[in-house]
């Protein structure tokens, strides 16, 4: 079962959102809730809960997955159980997108992209995964899968978020910032990614669709937790990440200077990833291919 209702094709939590007075955008994504008009500044909430089940999830696994991750993703290579944001560049040095990459096993990765460039990212990574020359396919021993909708993805953020999740854990522990772990939340097997940055505490919780309504209701039973639509969340994220606005505003090829990508920690100091040399050429040419 995926993250949509088989009967209606609507998101699994659609009825839950209706009850809360949600206004929907494209693909039945919650834009706002009725109560948000009286919230004040959403960044001051103790904890907010947002349904991000429309987030693109791309899985890569197999003997060639590590080589593929090093070539396709520009951040520092990840250890097992770690995650980070990083740019994915096309061969001409432009930015396909800036997904969150998590290494979930010794030869397994998941890339998560919430931006409007997720389709560009998916198409480029699919092309790269299947590239071959003179009969040689460097990533032939790798399985790729678009797993969007296989999990209901919830974002719990705010200063009270750790305490809320820890209430479920017992002897388990939450992953540290930049880490990913499998945990049981109220007897529901979940994958939790700690995407906190400095004082901004945030956790992505990936839950099986058949258990997601129970988990959603359970999380909202905490008085500290307030449901928040994607519109407010996007505004908050753009305030913290200037490159995110570039992803949302771009209508074609996206060029970002290497200096900026380095300053934001989105590329590593190396030439061993796709598009690295082309990016430097673009820099010298003022962004013109």
Image: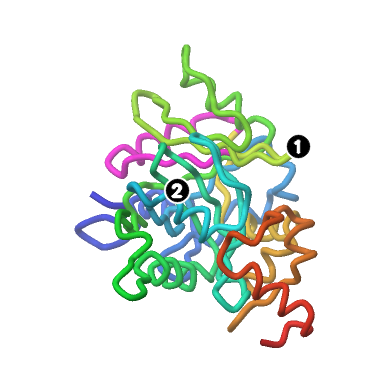
Q: Is residue 150 above or below residue 199?
A: below
- Mark 1 lies on residue: 199
- Residue 208: say if magenta: yes
In magenta, the rendered stretch is: 203-224
- Residue 264: say if magenta: no
Q: Residue drawn at (43%, 47%), measured in percent from left and top? A: 109
Left or right, 53 with respect to 187, comes to right
Q: Is residue 118 above or below residue 284?
A: above
* Front: mark 2 or 1: 2
Q: Which residue ends up furthest to the bottom in the rendered image?
A: 288
Q: Which residue ends up furthest to the left in the rendered image?
A: 7
Q: In terms of image quadrants, where is residue 44?
A: top right
If you read the primary sequence from the N terminus, does the residue marked by circle 2 or circle 1 appear first? 2
Image location (x, y in percent) of residue 143: 30, 55
Left or right, 106 with respect to 281, comes to left
Q: Distance between the Cα atoms at labels 2 and 1?
A: 32 Å
Q: Which mark is residue 58?
A: none
Image location (x, y in percent) of residue 102: 50, 45
Front one among 234 and 191: 191
Q: Residues within 10 Å of mark 2 (few under 14, many from 20)?
A: many
Q: Residue drawn at (63%, 74%), measured in percent from left and top? A: 93
Image location (x, y in percent) of residue 77: 57, 46
Front one among 206 and 132: 132
- Mark 2 lies on residue: 66
Image location (x, y in percent) of residue 189: 35, 30
Q: Residue drawn at (48%, 50%), measured in percent from left and top? A: 51
Front one among 42 and 270: 270
Q: Is residue 112 above or below residue 251?
A: above
Front one among 83 and 42: 83
């Amino acid at each position: 079962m995926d993250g949509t209702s088989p009967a209606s094709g609507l998101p699994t939590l659609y009825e839950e959102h209706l009850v809360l007075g949600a206004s929907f955008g494209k693909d039945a994504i919650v834009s706002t809730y009725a109560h948000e008009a009286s919230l004040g500044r959403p960044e001051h909430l103790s904890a907010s809960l947002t349904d991000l089940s429309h987030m693109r999830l791309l899985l890569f696994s197999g003997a060639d997955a590590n080589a593929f991750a090093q070539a396709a993703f520009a951040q520092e290579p990840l250890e097992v159980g770690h995650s980070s944001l990083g740019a994915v560049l096309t061969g001409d040095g432009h930015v396909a997108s800036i997904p969150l990459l998590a290494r979930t096993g010794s030869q397994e990765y998941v890339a998560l992209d919430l931006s409007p460039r997720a389709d560009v990212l998916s198409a480029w990574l699919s092309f790269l995964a299947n590239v071959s020359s003179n009969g040689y396919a460097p990533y032939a021993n790798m399985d790729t899968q678009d797993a969007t909708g296989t999990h209901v993805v919830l974002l719990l953020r705010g200063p009270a978020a750790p305490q809320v999740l820890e209430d479920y854990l017992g002897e388990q522990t939450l992953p540290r910032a930049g880490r990913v772990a499998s945990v049981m939340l109220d007897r529901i097997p979940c994958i939790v990614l700690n995407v906190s940055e400095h004082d901004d505490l945030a956790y992505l919780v990936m839950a099986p669709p058949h258990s997601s309504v129970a988990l959603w209701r359970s999380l909202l039973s905490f008085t500290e937790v307030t449901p928040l639509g994607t519109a407010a969340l996007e505004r908050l994220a753009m305030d913290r990440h200037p490159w995110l606005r570039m992803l949302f505003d771009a209508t074609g090829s996206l060029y970002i200077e290497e200096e900026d990508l380095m300053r934001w920690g989105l590329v590593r100091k190396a030439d061993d990833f796709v598009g690295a040399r082309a990016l430097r050429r673009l820099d010298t040419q003022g962004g013109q291919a």
